């Protein structure tokens, strides 16, 4: 069986408690979601945290399965207003640092941090950039890699990383949907590229993914978001889903079936299907290469 590590899954999202847009539609089923993940070959999952409270919640979940669940610590660019809102930005940063120091077995990356110029209505550019740079001190002190967010902001992201190169310890730009040139600039600084369904929507996305060096690739689902949809260019490379495993609408929820429209870590196999297809590579060999890449970056003590 292929081996996988999902480098980014939002397992603290309310959808895994059966809650959609504030309304309860079915029973909590995270245990079922995780069982499906382990059954397809996932060996580890890194839970994405985008604010202090999410990390605290993620750590509680991690401690239910300390050999397979891990988390990040950081503040998402669209939530960087939390630093100023706290009334003491330095104390807020130090609270993140303390979480890292007290949970070194469970925390494998600093993030999700970075820049997002697509959603400036949530946080302006200056605030995003200021607190992105401040969070790099967490990587410097912990020597952990970065789990990076980049939307319509590659030039500034690269500038920040280049300027602060001495503070950083590698990492990944996750959910990458940029150009080949942007990927090359990011990789030139020593970073990896994370691929999920949102990275494989268009023909241009597929062209970029096909050209990435295999030793810089990482796989993720960004669940419950970023599924590979039938309308995406990459869907032509998906393997058929058995009828008894096809997702059901949430109103018809069954614990042993995925929920239609809600992504989950088990779907990392679909990301591999698409990536192997567009690259015209053997899926088993590609999966093993990506697994080795991920272990070296996030779990170097186990390599």
Image: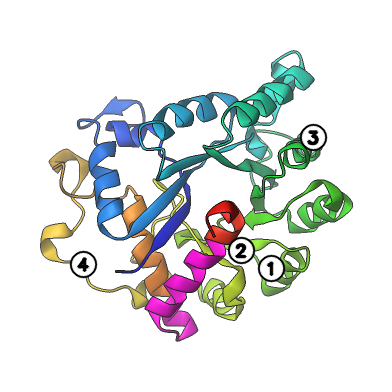
Determine the residue positioned at 65% across, 52% down: 151
Q: Looking at the rendering, which quadrant does residue 123 occupy? A: top right
Which numbered tag is attached to residue 142?
none
> Nearer the observer, disc 1 or disc 3?
3
Q: Which residue is mark 3?
A: 134
Which of the labelled discs sits on residue 183, or is there none? 1
Q: Which residues are magenta?
A: 276-294
| The stretch drawn in magenta includes residue 289 | yes
Numbered disc in front, either 2 or 4: 2
Q: Specify which label sits upstream in the sequence, 2 or 1.
A: 1
Q: CA distance from mark 2 to mark 4?
A: 27 Å
**Residue positioned most to the right:** 163
Q: Earlier in the sequence, mark 3 or mark 2?
A: 3
- Residue, x 85% and y 56% (percent of image)? 162
- Asked if residue 225 can be seen in this view, the reply is yes
Q: Going from the N terminus, do you reach mark 1 or mark 4 first?
A: 1
Element under label 1?
Answer: helix
Of the image marks 1 and 3, the number of the one nearer the N terminus:
3
Magenta span: chief secondary structure:
helix
Nearest the eye: 80 or 109: 109
Q: Is residue 49 above or below residue 299?
A: above
**Residue found at x 55% / y 56%:** 175
Name the residue that disc number 2 marks.
193
CB of mark 1 within 8 Å of CB of mark 3?
no
> Label 4: which residue?
241
Magenta residue check for 142 = no
* Label 1, label 4: how far apart the Cα atoms are: 32 Å
Label 3 CA crowd tier, 10 Å (few <14, some 14–19, many 20+): some
Label 4 residue SS: loop
Is the residue under label 2 in contact with that under label 3 (CB below 8 Å)? no
């Amino acid at each position: 069986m292929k081996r996988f590590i999902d480098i980014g899954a939002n397992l603290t999202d309310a959808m895994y408690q059966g809650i959609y847009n504030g309304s309860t539609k079915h029973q909590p089923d995270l245990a079922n979601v995780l069982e499906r993940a382990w059954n397809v070959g996932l060996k580890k999952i890194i839970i994405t945290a985008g604010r202090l409270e999410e990390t605290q919640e993620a750590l509680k979940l991690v401690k239910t399965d300390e050999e397979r669940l891990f988390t990040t610590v950081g503040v998402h660019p669209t939530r960087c207003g939390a630093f100023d809102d706290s009334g003491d930005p330095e104390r807020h940063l130090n609270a993140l640092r303390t979480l890292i120091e007290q949970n070194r077995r469970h925390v494998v990356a600093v993030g999700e941090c970075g820049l997002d110029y697509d959603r400036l209505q949530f946080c302006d550019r200056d605030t995003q950039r200021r607190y992105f740079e401040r969070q790099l001190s967490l990587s410097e002190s912990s020597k952990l890699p970065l789990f990076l967010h980049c939307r319509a902001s590659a030039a500034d992201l690269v500038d920040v990383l280049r300027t602060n190169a001495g503070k950083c310890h590698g990492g990944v730009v996750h959910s990458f949907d940029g150009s080949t040139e942007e990927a090359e600039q990011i990789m030139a600084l020593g970073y990896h590229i994370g691929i999920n369904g949102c990275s494989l929507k268009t023909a241009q996305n597929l062209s970029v993914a096909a050209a990435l060096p295999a030793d810089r690739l990482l796989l993720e689902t960004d669940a419950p978001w970023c599924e590979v949809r039938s309308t995406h260019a990459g869907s032509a490379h998906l393997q058929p889903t058995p009828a008894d495993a096809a997702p059901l609408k949430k109103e018809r929820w069954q614990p042993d079936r995925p929920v239609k429209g809600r992504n989950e870590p088990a779907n990392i196999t679909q990301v591999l299907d698409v990536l192997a297809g567009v690259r015209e590579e053997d899926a088993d060999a590609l999966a093993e290469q990506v697994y080795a890449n991920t272990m070296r970056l996030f779990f170097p003590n186990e390599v």
